[in-house]
Every structure is written in structure tokens, then in C-alpha cells.
Amino acid sequence: MIQDMRMSEGVEWALHTCLNLAWVERDRAVPTSTLAAFYELPPAYLNKQLQALVRAGILASTPGPRGGFRLARAPEEITVLDVVVAIEGPQEAFECAEILRRGPGGAPGVDYRKICVISQFMRQAELNWRRELAGRTLADLKATVEERFPAVPGEVRHGLTGTRT
């Protein structure tokens, strides 16, 4: 059972890193140290998040001295939910413990997850949350940032690769 409903900071780090990589040339790998330094993050912990993104097929890694990470798919093909699940795992946020079974009138053979109003409500809320995250892509985030903060793409490219274009 989940003890803490908050997402880890790794989700924020992963989303920002993926967004930043969307502004770098598709074939250019950026080292963990460079990605971590951009936001003053601990490289070893960021690397754990990056490896989870590689396992999920969101990032590709290139070994060696000129290695690093790049997006494995186009930003239009990466949803916010993809990143969240890669970092946090696919488990549901709410797990019905079926406490109604132990209460007055509880019956041992009933699946309370299916008839409990609270369980149904929580499940629907989570489905709505997941649907919203699945409906937003990295390309959507990228377009919003570019509209609201036009200088950011050039600043990110310069910070990660030394170039502005």
C-alpha cells in the first residue's frame, strides 16, 4: 500500500530533463553531469531517473566519452504519463483495503472494491488524472514553454551544448 501520495522529486527532474532534451538536436547525447549541473542536481540520483527513462524507451543512452542521453522518441510520442510511470511505477495511487468487510454487516465473500462508493470514487479520480497526463505530450509542454517563455529554448541549448541554434 502506498504510504505517501506525493510523487518523488524524480518526476519533476525527469520531466524537466526530457523537456530540455527536446530542444537539443535529436542525435546529440548530453552527459548526465551536464544535465545535472543545469539545475544543480546530484548527478548520481539524476542518473537513476535517466536510467529508468531509458528502460521505459523514453530516452536512449550512448556510452563512452562522448556519450550521454537523448530522447528515444519524438516529443509528440512521449506523454507526461509515460514519464510519471517510468519514474514512479505503474501501481495505483489508491488501494482499497476493503475495510467494509470487517465492519458491521461485512461479508467475507464480497469484493468491496467493486461496490464501495469510496473505492469507486477514488478509482475514477485516478483514471481521470491518468487520462489527463496521458493526453499531454512533451511536445505540448514544449509548445507552451516556447509560447510563454520564448528565450528558454535557446538558453537551454546553450546551457547543454554551448550553442543557441
Image (cartoon, helix red, strand yellow):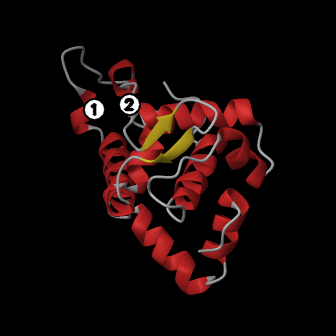
**Does 88 appear above or below 102?**
below
Badge number at residue 55: none
Work out whether residue 150 or residue 30 is closer to the camera in this orientation and state it: 30
Outermost residue to the right:
40
Q: Quadrant of the C terminus?
A: bottom right
Q: Amino acid at mark 1?
A: Arg
Q: Is residue 37 left or right of residue 7?
A: right
List the residue tagged with mark 2: 96
Outermost residue to the top:
108
Give the x, y percent position of residue 34. Answer: 71, 47
Tags 1 and 2 in contact by the CB under 8 Å rule? yes
Cα distance, mark 1 to mark 2? 6 Å
Q: Quadrant of residue 140?
A: bottom left
Give the x, y percent position of residue 126. Answer: 38, 49
Q: Quadrant of residue 44?
A: top right
Q: At 35% from the left edge and 51% from the top edge, which residue is drawn? A: 73
Give the x, y percent position of residue 61. Answer: 49, 36
Answer few, some or many: residues within 10 Å of disc 1's Cα (few below 14, many 20 plus, some between 14 and 19). some
Q: Amino acid at mark 2?
A: Cys
- Disc 2, SS: loop
Give the x, y percent position of residue 113. Answer: 28, 32
- Work out whether mark 1 precedes mark 2 in sequence or the reverse, and give the earlier one: 2
List the residue tagged with mark 1: 113
Q: At 68% from the left edge and 57% from the top edge, which residue is drawn? A: 160
Q: Is residue 101 left or right of residue 31?
A: left
Q: Is residue 138 left or right of residue 36?
A: left
Q: At 37% from the left edge and 44% from the top edge, which residue is drawn? A: 118
- Disc 1, SS: helix
